Amino acid sequence: MNTELEKYIQSTSSYFEEKYGAAPTLVAYAPGRINIIGEHTDYNLGLSMPAAINRWVIVCLRPRPDQNISVTSQNYHDKMEYTLGQDFTPGDSWEKYVYGCITIFNNQYNLNKGFEAVIWGNVPIGSGVSSSAAIEVALMNALRAAYAADMDDLTLVKMCQRVEHEYLKVNSGLLDQYASQFSREGKLMILDFNQLSSDYVDADMKDWAWILADTKVKRELAGSKYSERVRETADALQEVKSKDSSVQGFRDITEEHITLISDSVQQKRIRHLVLENQRVLQAAEALSQKNFEELGKLLTASHQSLRDDYEVSCPELDFLVDTALQLPYCAGSRMMGGGFGGCTISLVRKDAVHKFSNFLTDEYAREYDIVTELNNYQLVDGAGSYKI
């Protein structure tokens, strides 16, 4: 196990003992993720290239003999308590994730007893590295292990996705949960949402590094333009299907089909989807050939598409990308995540990371009076659990 993760599990277990007077009997953990390329493709059954990062959510849990549930957020110094079978309305957003996981699990596998749990995490919130999915996947792994549920990993991530749909009202795809559960250390995943399958490619970056820059602009996807994009692409698919019987789903759509879409905005949305899927395959080829200049160009093309065709960028993201691309040691840059805030991901020469970080930090502070946070993550294994 990762030594960083071991240290965090130990401190979270100690906090559990302090709060509940005894040691936990089970630990589960799930990482956040980055996504190299393939954005807004998951709910359209496309392709993406994610990997888990060395930031985690940890759940320490101990079953109780009664029907009471007590969950403490170590980060928020807050506690959520209720009794199984009684009405309960979750408050803050962290409670919605927790209550959603417990309720969906209970409906499927029938919790016969309650539990005590502590949740801690260091996945940055609202930065596009999927803190919400890490909470869901960690807690669902904890529940599966604690109650010996006959649940495979794919079922688990689909149940986590239901939490987003039913309790956060976000029509998200499976990218975040799948990457958090299935990632492998030192690998990038080529994830096919149409088949719900994944291949892995070695992430030997030689002299290059992935650098994330946080806009510090926090976006709430619920009720936002995210759901609007889901509707726009779904409507476009229906129109194409009505005009070409050979098209059964998103993956059957080619560039030639775009002209069949009567709405010009929906045309742009589908163009992004078709070309972004192509870019994922081209990125995998560039990685296999260690052609990092080409990989960088694909990143930048992805950003331009997300900005102009999918229209999910924002001025702060565009500024960070444009500033990064001024530097000769940056091969490419793009926004990452749902958009409207969050972070950028840039491909930067390792020997220039310090210069890159200083330049980006200075320019962003000058433009927006905001101190950006830059991170260089390690690629780690996906979620897991074990009994103590």
Image (tube, rainbow, N blue to C red):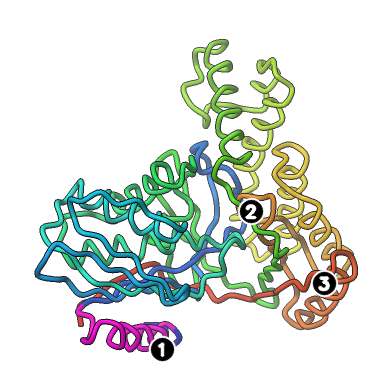
Between 273 and 383, the one lying in front of the other is 383
Between 343 and 20, the one lying in front of the other is 20
Mark 2 element type: loop
Three-letter residue code for mark 2 = Arg
Task: Identify the residue at horizontal 64%, vertical 62% (top origin).
Answer: 289
Point out the stretch of residues depicted in magenta: 5-25
Whether pointer 1 and pointer 2 mark residues with C-beta atoms closer than 8 Å, the reply is no
Residue 142 image position (x, y, % from top left)? 27, 67
Q: Is residue 378 left or right of residue 9?
A: right
- As displayed, is residue 37 above or below residue 33? above
Mark 1 element type: helix
Please give the residue where the numbered disc 1 appears in the rendered image: 7
Tell me how far mark 3 sits from mark 2, CA to CA.
21 Å
Main SS of the magenta part reads helix
Q: Earlier in the sequence, mark 1 or mark 2?
A: 1
Q: Is residue 177 left or right of residue 210?
A: left
Residue 272 image position (x, y, % from top left)? 67, 37
Task: Identify the residue at horizontal 24%, vertical 54% (top origin).
Answer: 152
Quarter occupied by the N terminus: bottom left
Please give the residue where the numbered disc 2 appears in the rendered image: 219
Quarter occupied by the C terminus: bottom left
Please give the residue where the numbered disc 3 appears in the rendered image: 360
Point out the frontmost of discs 1 and 2: 2
Q: Confirm whether the magenta stretch covers residue 18.
A: yes
